[in-house]
Amino acid sequence: MSHPTESRTPHRRPTEHPTLGIFYEHPDWFRPLFRELERRDVPHRKLRAVDHHFDPGETDTPFPVVFNRMSPSAYLRGGTDQIFYTSQYLTHLERQGVRVINGSRAWRTEISKAAQLSLLQALGLGYPAARVIHRAEAAPAAAEELRFPVVVKPNVGGSGAGVIRFDSPDALRRAARAGELDFGIDGTALVQEFIPAQDGRIVRVEVLNGRFLYAIRIYTPGDQFNLCPADVCRSVDGAELERAACPADAPANELTVEGFEPPPPVVQAVERITAAAGIEIGGVEYMIDDRDGRLYYYDVNALSNFVADGPRVVGFDPFARLADWLEEELARATAPRRSPPASLLSAPATTGAGATLEVTP
Ligand SMILES: Nc1ncnc2c1ncn2[C@@H]1O[C@H](COP(=O)(O)OP(=O)(O)O)[C@@H](O)[C@H]1O
Ligand SMILES: [Mg+2]
């Protein structure tokens, strides 16, 4: 049996049209994206996670760019295996030199609320105080230093699934004892202080290519944890929104949404968070504490399931911006590389200011 030891440099199949791979799980959410790519004739291949496989020995990757659209909530649809598989596939692609948008680093953050809070801590940003636990019986003791109410949240999140509120240590103790706490697929959870959101609303800020794209405010009637922006079907003025990304029978809910311009320090903070997480496209959620006006970031998402009816709510179609960017990335990844001038090859790698000298293709 022979092994391809001659060359470790990945080479690509000479395809006439370099193709964008889109790796995803949810059957409906990306329809508007696929439609936009089709309309523009952007060569792309749908890589459905459910029936995907790869050869770790391949040195010949057909995709110069792969866009990771895996959903952490796949486990709600019978896709727990796909969540773990995604880590393997992304790491493989990256070793092959494939340009992966929202690669393995973004995915690691996406599937760990504990990692998200550690990151917020490292960046000096506010988040609701929490303890990370891995046994239900540990919940009451972990909550001792926290202010009630608290929520218990599975470490691997997804559209608010499994988030439960407890108003007293007693209620938490009873639930822990009765085996009513669900820690989700990695057996890890947060016990976190519940923040009463000012005006019952949260803000979700989206970035694309690492930069602010838009923000929305979502209004929730009371204690609702299930908050998928693309599922919000009404604007604050009562207009019915077109939910192109959702199946026609998606449950209507009581949420309403409006476009919103966050203050510049928030925009900067969100761009820092996503950059540090390796998230090139994604969304960060925050709320203002009604008691003291403080701002808390609490959810870092690599999967942007854009707001329904973007043109109506935020004034433009985010899927068109996304398609613009993907086209650029595909062109960049496949542009013939110019050799750097000889003078640069012998020059020191950094300039006087310490900035890395970049040779752009
Ligand atoms: N600490 C908290 N206090 C109050 N409400 C919260 C808190 N954490 C989450 N929520 C509510 O629950 C929803 C889902 O929680 P989130 O952490 O965003 O999970 P997911 O990753 O599943 O979206 C949030 O959008 C928010 O409305
Ligand atoms: Mg969320």
Image (cartoon, helix red, strand yellow):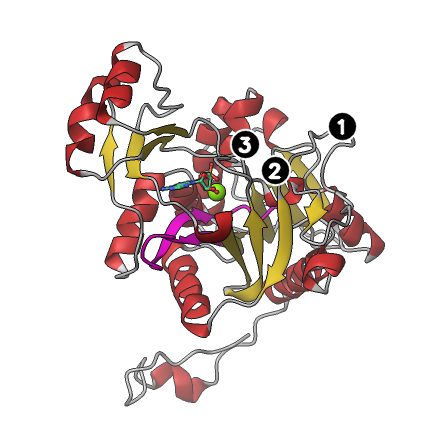
Residue drawn at the location 30% of the way across and 16% of the way down: 175
Q: Is residue 82 above or below residue 305?
A: above
Q: Which residue is mark 3?
A: 54
Residue drawn at the location 65% of the way across and 44% of the way down: 230
Q: Residues within 10 Å of mark 3 (few under 14, many from 20)?
A: few
Residue 201 visible somewhere in the drawing: no
The image position of residue 292, as x and y in percent, is: 31, 57
Q: Is residue 332 left or right of residue 245?
A: left
Q: Is residue 19 left or right of residue 282?
A: right
In this rendering, which labeled residue sits more in front, label 2 or label 1?
1
Amino acid type shown at disc 2? Tyr
Determine if the magenta segment contains residue 224. no
Amino acid type shown at disc 3? Phe
Image mark for residue 299: none
- Marks 1 and 3, the one that precedes in the sequence: 3
Q: Which residue is mark 2?
A: 24
In this rendering, which labeled residue sits more in front, label 1 or label 3?
1
Work out which quarter of the rendered image holds the C terminus and state it: bottom right
Q: Residues within 10 Å of mark 2 (few under 14, many from 20)?
A: many
Which region shows up in magenta? 284-305
Amino acid type shown at disc 1? Asp
Could you give the CA–CA distance between mark 1 and mark 3, rounded to whole angstroms?
34 Å
The image position of residue 182, as x and y in percent, is: 37, 20
Residue at the outermost right position:
39
- Which quadrant holds residue 231? top right
Q: Which residue is mark 1?
A: 249
Determine if the magenta segment contains residue 292. yes
In this rendering, which labeled residue sits more in front, label 2 or label 3?
2
The image position of residue 78, as x and y in percent, is: 55, 19
